[in-house]
Structure formats: C-alpha cells, structure tokens
Amino acid sequence: MRNRSKIFSAKIQEQIEGSVISLINGEKDLMSATTIDDPRAVGGVIQKLLGQEFKSLLPKDILKEYIPSFPRRSMADFAFTDNDGFSYMVDCKTHNLDTVFNMPNLYHFAIKFLNLVL
C-alpha cells in the first residue's frame, strides 16, 4: 500500500475536478424553473447525478470498488476504494455564491478527522 493516495496528486485531482464541473455544466435539463431556487432540491439533484456518474469520472486504473449510494441518513452519499487500498466516502455539498449568509457544514471537521486517523 502506498503512503499517499494517487487521487490527490495535482494532475489527477485537477482532472477529476474538471470532469465534475463539465458533467454538471453539461446537464442543461438538470433543474426546472420551480426547483432552481430551492437549495435542497439543487443539492439533491447534484448528489444523485454524482452518485450515478462519479465512477466514470475517475481514471480507469484507479478504481477497485464503487458504492453509488447510501441510506438517506448516512453521512456519505457515495464511496469508493482505489487499487492502493485507500477508501473514500464522499458527501456532496453545494454552495450558492449569490447568498450573503451560509450555514457551515461538517466538511472541514471530517477532513481534519480523517487526516488524523490516516
């Protein structure tokens, strides 16, 4: 097992980020006029789309196992394991850049906790 995940190398991370952005921006019929202003609806649709498609956005030689969804109350939305044995649990978050106040989430805590555990 490697000491550090290949996914966090600059090249692969940028590739995945670009693919996620292209996927979301390419979905022209993702939201309707009635749901576009509802942050929960937007988050739910993005979560479902990424759960279904994220596997195809990863480099082919990295992925060992993929779990596309979890029960509703789970912290993770989808998960995967790479060929080096690293496991990833992904919790999708969206952020409306047009708002002044936004509620904080547990993302930073989870990342710090996971870094301490690893």
Image (tube, rainbow, N blue to C red):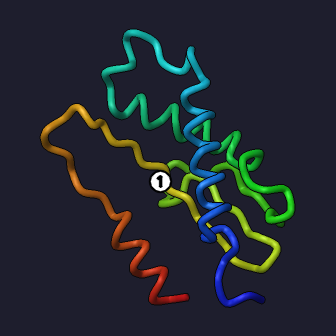
Relative placement, left or right, of 82 versus 105 is: right
Residue positioned 42% across, 30% down in the render: 42
Give the position of the C terminus as an image quadrant: bottom right
Q: Nearer the viewer, residue 61 or 40?
A: 61
Residue positioned 86% across, 63% down in the render: 61
Residue placed farthest to the top in the image? 33
Residue 79 on image: x %, y % = 65, 60
Residue 94 on image: x %, y % = 39, 42
Residue placed farthest to the left in the image? 100
Residue 107 on image: x %, y % = 38, 63
Residue 105 on image: x %, y % = 30, 58
Q: Nearer the viewer, residue 41 or 57?
A: 57
Compared to residue 109, the image places residue 117 above or below, namely: below
Relative placement, left or right, of 16 versus 114 is: right
Dot 1: few (<14), some (14–19), or many (≥20) neighbours within 10 Å? few
Mark 1, residue position: 73
Quadrant location of residue 88? bottom right
Q: Nearer the viewer, residue 42 or 59?
A: 59
Compared to residue 19, the image places residue 13 above or below, namely: below
